[in-house]
Image: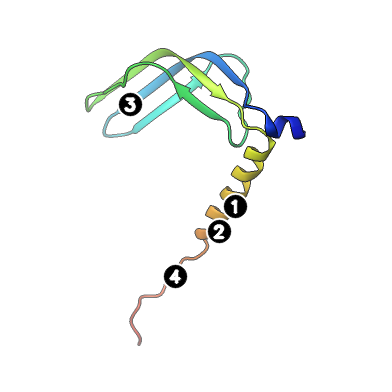
Amino acid sequence: MIKEILTGRETINVPCTIEIENTFESLHAHVDLDGDLEMNAGDQVLVHGDPVRVPYGQKVTLRRFATVTRANRLDRAWTRILARLELTELYEVSFSSGSKL
């Protein structure tokens, strides 16, 4: 466990499929990694290649390579802590009108 914290992170290069849509119904970009790679909290994905611009009303599907950088135990724990703290920010919502009756 100590060795994992002190050493660098594991990287894996894998092919992937990118789907980008820029239409009235949807504006999204999805990356599907090939193989049976399980992603965990804190893992990062970097897709290689030139930037892609999709004109309005179109949808594009591309094949590229991606580098997955695995988070170590410390990174995973830190990511989970930050996610909990950010989630609690959503609880601080007020539904008052701001005017006194």
Q: Could you classify mark 3 by the number of other residues whose Cα lies within 10 Å: few (under 14), some (14-19), or many (20 or more)?
A: some
Residues at badges 4 and 1 in contact (C-beta under 8 Å)? Answer: no
The mark closer to the camera, 3 or 2, is 2
Q: Could you classify mark 2 by the number of other residues whose Cα lies within 10 Å: few (under 14), some (14-19), or many (20 or more)?
A: few
Mark 4 = which residue?
94
At x 62% / y 32%, what residue is drawn? Answer: 71
Residues at badges 2 and 1 in contact (C-beta under 8 Å)? Answer: yes
Q: Is residue 100 above or below residue 54?
A: below
Left or right: 79 with respect to 18?
Answer: right
At x 69% / y 33%, what residue is drawn? Answer: 6
Q: Is residue 68 above or below residue 77?
A: above
Residue type of the residue flagged with mark 1: Arg
Please tell me whether mark 1 sits on a helix, a strand or a loop.
Answer: helix
At x 62% / y 26%, what residue is drawn? Answer: 9
C-alpha span from label 4 to label 1 = 20 Å
Q: Could you classify mark 1 by the number of other residues whose Cα lies within 10 Å: few (under 14), some (14-19), or many (20 or more)?
A: few
Q: Quadrant of residue 1?
A: top right
C-alpha span from label 4 to label 3 = 35 Å
Q: Quadrant of the C terminus?
A: bottom left
Residue type of the residue flagged with mark 3: Glu
For this rendering, which residue is in front, 99 or 5? 5
Left or right: 30 with respect to 25?
Answer: right
Mark 3 = which residue?
21
The mark closer to the camera, 4 or 1, is 1
Mark 2 = which residue?
88
List the single residue furthest toward the front: 6
For marks 4 and 3, the one nearer the N-term is: 3
Residue type of the residue flagged with mark 4: Ser
